[in-house]
Image (cartoon, grey):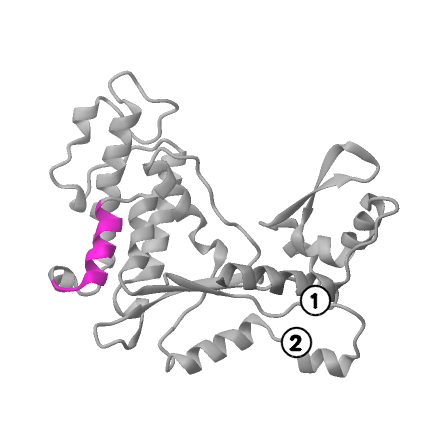
């Protein structure tokens, strides 16, 4: 298991205010429960969008299509917790300056997007940018002497040189798998090394809280990451893209009725459950 993603309940149907207060469970409630279970090992929970530029940067290093999850801060959170050699919970921030690394990743990504060439600094000893031609500051396009591959490799070296300082106990890199897997992310920044970081008793803990009619927020809907693709009832040659929370709260009943097959009746829930149970029994056999 490399991660656990929680989904606090989204409410449906007509309920009283008293029932709403009793049933409502938010991401804040979840954070309290997680810290109670882990003996307050997690200091910080981050909105999902916090690492948007970092994931884009790692994809760029891989020469892969870039992606970043830029959902609203109230849609969910993510963090990583360390399970040490004694099977005890420890905070990621005990090992690394995670906020510093995120800020550094954001800075390098902005440089990449602006095609900016880093100037020689104290942590770039041994790299003479003059070897790449008469380039200074920001350039509009790569010149003939500077290939795209060369720029990627140089920025990887720059990212490593600036990122290694966020390790809090560098002397442990030789003995700790957690430090070693993190060092790989910095030394060889790509999507694979980031994924492998979760294979060494490092657990991602995340949450997505879908909305309902009682906490609906248009700002959240405008930044939705999860969409339904449905046939437009008014023109079946078109497909509608509907945000997940808006679908369940506003559109589902209307669209399902409009797209229903005439003369057909949906199976009752208990019939479907019985069929599923029967199917599972055949799988066991």
> Which residue is rendered at x = 21% and y = 64% of the image?
168
Q: Which sits earlier in the primary sequence, circle 2 or circle 1?
A: 2
> Which residue is rendered at x = 27% and y = 27% of the image?
149
Question: Is residue 41 in the magenta section?
Answer: no
Q: In this view, does 254 lie to the left or right of 87?
A: right
> Which residue is rendered at x = 28% and y = 65% of the image?
201
Q: Where is residue 245 in the image (x, y as percent from the top left)?
A: 68, 56
Is residue 279 depicted above or below 15 in this figure?
Answer: above
Q: Position of residue 6 (x, y in %)?
A: 51, 67
Q: How many labels does the image show?
A: 2
Name the foreground residue: 280 vs 100: 280
List the residue tagged with mark 2: 24
The numbered disc on residue 215 is 1
Is residue 263 depicted above or below 135 in this figure?
Answer: below
Q: Position of residue 267 (x, y in %)?
A: 77, 57
Name the foreground residue: 134 vs 169: 169
Q: What stretch is highlighted in magenta?
A: 175-187
């Amino acid at each position: 298991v490399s991660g656990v993603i929680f989904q606090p309940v989204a409410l449906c149907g007509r309920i009283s205010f008293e029932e709403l207060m009793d049933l409502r469970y938010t991401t804040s409630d979840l954070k309290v429960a997680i810290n109670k279970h882990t003996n307050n090992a997690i200091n910080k929970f981050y909105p999902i969008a916090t690492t948007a530029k970092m994931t884009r940067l790692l994809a760029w290093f891989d020469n892969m299509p870039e992606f970043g999850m830029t959902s609203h801060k109230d849609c969910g959170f993510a963090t990583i917790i360390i399970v040490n050699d004694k099977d005890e919970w420890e905070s990621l921030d005990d090992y690394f300056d995670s906020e510093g690394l995120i800020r550094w990743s954001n800075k390098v990504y902005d440089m990449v997007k602006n095609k900016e060439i880093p100037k020689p600094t104290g942590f770039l000893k041994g790299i003479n940018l003059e070897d790449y031609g008469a380039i200074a500051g920001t350039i509009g396009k790569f010149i003939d002497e500077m290939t795209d591959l060369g720029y990627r490799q140089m920025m990887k070296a720059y990212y490593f040189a600036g990122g290694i300082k966020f390790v809090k106990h560098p002397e442990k890199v030789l003995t700790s798998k957690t430090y070693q897997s993190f060092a790989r992310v910095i030394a060889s920044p790509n999507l694979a090394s980031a994924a492998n970081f979760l294979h060494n008793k490092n657990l991602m803990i995340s949450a997505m809280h879908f909305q309902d009619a009682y906490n609906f927020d248009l700002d959240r809907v405008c930044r939705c990451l999860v969409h339904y693709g449905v046939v437009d009832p008014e023109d079946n040659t078109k497909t509608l893209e509907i945000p997940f929370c808006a679908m369940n709260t506003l559109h589902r009943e209307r669209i399902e009725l409009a797209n229903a097959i005439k003369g057909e009746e949906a199976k009752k829930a208990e019939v479907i459950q019985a069929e599923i149970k029967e199917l599972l029994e055949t799988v066991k056999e």
